[in-house]
Each structure stands twice: as structure tokens, then as C-alpha cells.
Amino acid sequence: MNIIKVLEKIEENGFEAYIVGGYVRDYLLGIESSDIDVCTNARVKDIMEIFSDINCTSNDYGSVKIITDKLRVDITTYRRDLRYNGDRRKVEIEYVDNLIDDINRRDFTMNTLCMNKDKSIIDILGGQKDIEDRIIRCVGNIEDRINEDPLRMLRAVRFATTLGFTIEDELYRQLKENKELISQLSRERIKEELTKILISKNAIIGLNMLEELGFLPYVGISYNRDIVNVADICGMYSQLELLEEFPFSKEEKDNIKAIQNILEYGKIDNNVLFDYGLYLSLVAGEILGIDKEVITSMDKDLPIRRVKDIDVTSDVICEILGTKPGKVISEVYDDLRDKILFSKLDNSNDSIKEYISSNREKWFDEGAVN
């Protein structure tokens, strides 16, 4: 099933249906988009019945999601927003049968365009002209829109960044004057928008815009002007000073910390490749301005990739040193690792045993063997 079939199936059951928002905007800009929003005068119960033969789920916000191998669609009933709660999330809506009412509740004119099953564009608020002019203009009263949901302030910056658009003068002024509203947003919502800015090829422009608008303290970041734009999101976050707690996953936290450690070390060598692996080394290397082919070549020639690759067992080390398992074993392995990584010792059992035997006094002198 494709998106046109979705529209046709809704209409065959007596309802209206249009593709709306970002997909239509991106279609006009020649940008591929995988997520599609559909608006309709059908209620959730009707939609669930219409698509009872395929995988679809509904939620508390009057939306039905259809996910297939080739399709990801959110179908939402026409609505009018009536009231927002403390953090400006929608808590009270009214379902309506009028497309115009639904369009008038949206954030920016470029996101109000609709497309019917024949791929004809329905443009009620002049969004197509604003897309042609590459300008971000608010729907209706600007102050009302951003007070309803301050996330729209970050979305304006995100769209300006990712699409290369300009924010209309009055909207820009209002964003600057109302910057404190961002503090009402959850860290999750802020992170979501900031991440979309940071993964853009225009990320530096976006960060500069956040700074010019005075948003940075409320977003919870600061940054150095020497920041390097890289494709990896953890690579971008590793270059920021995070003034507030961000809801990172454990993997994200570990990767950000690892990249920061490499950047502080200031170079990519066999130690870095051994400790952090090729991918994180490439990310940090890009920030440091090191050719990725050089790093890849170094990684290819890496003599060992983990301690277990060292060709001697702990039992043999204990036997040579005449000691029991303990801290000394890890100290010996650390020494062997460094020697092997930097080609000062062959990773062969005979060479390693000879090295340990010849340097036995080294660990005695350092107090490692009791």
C-alpha cells in the first residue's frame, strides 16, 4: 500500500483525506521524506475500522499510526486546539469537520500545505509562496503561537537551519523577546530539536542563531567558535559545554565521554584505537583534522585489539614471576600491551616470555610482587 492508496481508501469510505505538513513542504523542495502526516474528518474509530486489515495503532491524541515495510503514516482527525497545560503540551482539543480550522492551528505557513490523492496542492495560507521565498512565517498571531507551545521557537531555528530558510523579521523579534519561554520545555523536547539542528550540515549556522536569539542559556549549552561540524551526533555534543542535564542514553553518554577523552589527548595513535575502537577514533580524528585514511590504515595494522589477544596466559605470567594472581598481572598486561602496540615487542609467546623473564626485577622493584 502506498500513500495515495491510503487517501483513496479513506475517501472510498465517505471521508476527506489529505497529506499535510512537512511531507508536502519537502515534496516541493525536492527532499525525500519517509514520515507522512495525513489529516481527515474521519474519527479514530472510523480510521481503525477502515484499516482493520493492516497493522495500525491509535493513541490518546486522536491519531492513528500505520507502519509497513515501505510506509510510515500518522493519520489525525481535523481539530482545533482549545487549551494548553503548564508545559504547553496540548491537553484539550476539539475535533472539527473543517480543514481550514485544522490548518489554522499549525505553526508555520510552510507546514500548512495539503496534497490530495491527485497530488494537487491545496494552499490556504500562502505557504507555497513562503517556500519559494524560503522564509519562515508564523500562522496567525505570533505571540499566541509561541505562548501556546514554546517548542515552536526551537522549531523555527531548526527549520531555518536544516532548510536554509530565513525567519521573518517580526517572528525573529518575538523569538528574541520571549526566549525565557524555552525554560518551560522538558529536557527531552529540547534535546530532540537541538539534535536535529546539530546533525544538519548547517549546524554551525544553527548554533550561531541560537546564540544571537539568546536561547543558549535556556537550551542549556555553550560552545566554542572553533567547533567542527561532523556527521556523528555524539561528536557534535562532545564539543559543547552542557550547562544542563540532557536525557542521553548510556551509549550516548559513553560515546560523548570517549570522544572528549580523545580530544583532550589530542591525537590518534594505537593506544586510542585500542581503547576506543575505529569508529570513535574516526569521529575524534575528524574534529582534530586527521585524515580518516591515515586512521583507517593505523587501525588495519593494529597488532592487538584487546588484552586477550596478547599471546600469554596469566598462569604463565604467574609462573615466570613466581607469584599468585593479583594486581601484578594487570600491571604486566598493561606493560605488554604498550610494548606490543608500539612495536617494541612482538606478540609471540616466546618473545613475551623472554621479555617477562628478562624484566622480572622490574616488577619486584616497583613493588608489584610481594
Image: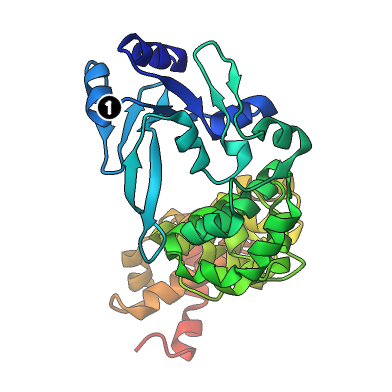
- Camera-side residue of 101 and 107: 101
Residue 135 % position (x, y): 73, 43
Q: Quadrant of the C terminus?
A: bottom left
Residue 197 in view, yes or no: yes
Q: Relative to 24, say whether 8 is above or below.
A: above
Q: Quadrant of the N terminus?
A: top left
- Camera-side residue of 278 and 55: 55
What residue sits 57% from the left and 50% below the top? Answer: 196
Residue 287 in view, yes or no: no
- Camera-side residue of 313 and 226: 226
What residue sits 36% from the left and 26% below the top? Answer: 41
Q: Residues within 10 Å of mark 1 (few under 14, many from 20)?
A: some
What residue sits 31% from the left and 25% below the top? Answer: 42
Give the labeled residue for mark 1: 56
Give the tally of numbered discs.
Answer: 1
- Camera-side residue of 108 and 357: 108
Left or right: 201, with 365 as reference point:
right
Residue 276 % position (x, y): 53, 59
Q: Relative to 176, say whether 8 is above or below.
A: above
Q: Quadrant of residue 110?
A: top right
Left or right: 197, with 357 as reference point:
right
Residue 269 % position (x, y): 66, 61
Under mark 1, the amino acid is: Cys
What residue sits 59% from the left and 53% below the top? Answer: 141
Q: How is the image coloured?
A: rainbow
Q: Relative to 193, say whether 242 is above or below.
A: below
Residue 51 % position (x, y): 27, 19
The secondary structure type at the circle numbered 1 is strand
